[in-house]
Image (cartoon, grey):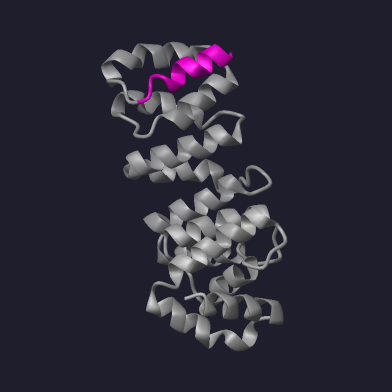
Amino acid sequence: EYLGQEAVYQLAGEPIKETLPVYKLAMKTDNLMIRQAIATSVQEIPLELKPIFETLLEDRSYVTLEFALAGLASAYPEDLLTYLEPFKYVDGFQNKNIKLLWLAIAISSEVYGASANEIFLSELKDYTSPDFSFEVRQKAFEYVYQLRLFDSGSLKNLVNACTHYNWRFRNTAREMLKELLVDEKYRNQLESLSDLFSEKEKNYLDRISADK
């Protein structure tokens, strides 16, 4: 099993004409870890691998599903609805990896239309709130950051995350905030929210302002 995974990882970047037979053989093993290795190691999905990747959407592994869905959505946007519909109500792991990826793809593609997009956007931003676990919030922040969707509410939630007890989550939030504050738009937005922050949050903002 381990050797099978390693063999798949070594195929990355090799010409598809040479590796296609190996990928097909690897898929026939029906081994969850080997199929996961295929999903996570292929950066761009050529047409020859499309049928193989589409079968990965039927796997039991949420890791496999996340990478396969992201890869197929990026490579074949014309088939987005086919890929998204089966996962409309799937959360995935505790961090809601499938749900949040689904929302990000739906929002960025607008494949469900403008009205639905507003609902999806609101849901994605809601997941940045302290009402959810830091695992969910971190994943939500990553997509909001990538798509540059921050508004007053999610920006306030990001400042809150900068004072969180979990140091990994806290540091990730601080790096995001640091990057956002390069943009005057976000600096002005943050200033307009000043009355809404807790003392702890205000102290942190004062500290990073003094460090500039």
Near-viewer residue (12 or 136): 12
Q: Where is residue 106, by image quadrant?
A: bottom left
Q: Residue at x 40, y 79 (%)?
A: 185
Q: What residue do we see at 48% from left, 31% from top?
A: 40
Of all residues, the one furthest to the front in this rendering is: 211
Q: Is residue 176 left or right of residue 76?
A: right
In the figure, residue 164 lies in which quadrant?
A: bottom right
205 vs 174: above or below: below
Tell me what residue is drawn at x 31 percent, y 21 percent: 14
x, y percent for residue 49: 35, 25
Where residue 116 appears, as percent x and y from the top left, is: 48, 63
The residue at the point 63 percent across, 60 percent down is 170
Question: Was residue 10 drawn as part of the magenta stretch in this picture?
Answer: yes
Q: Position of residue 154 (x, y in %)?
A: 55, 70
Quarter occupied by residue 196: bottom right
> Is-magenta flag for residue 46?
no
Image quadrant for the N terminus? top right
Q: Which residues are magenta?
A: 1-12
Q: Is 12 or 48 nearer to us in this picture?
A: 12
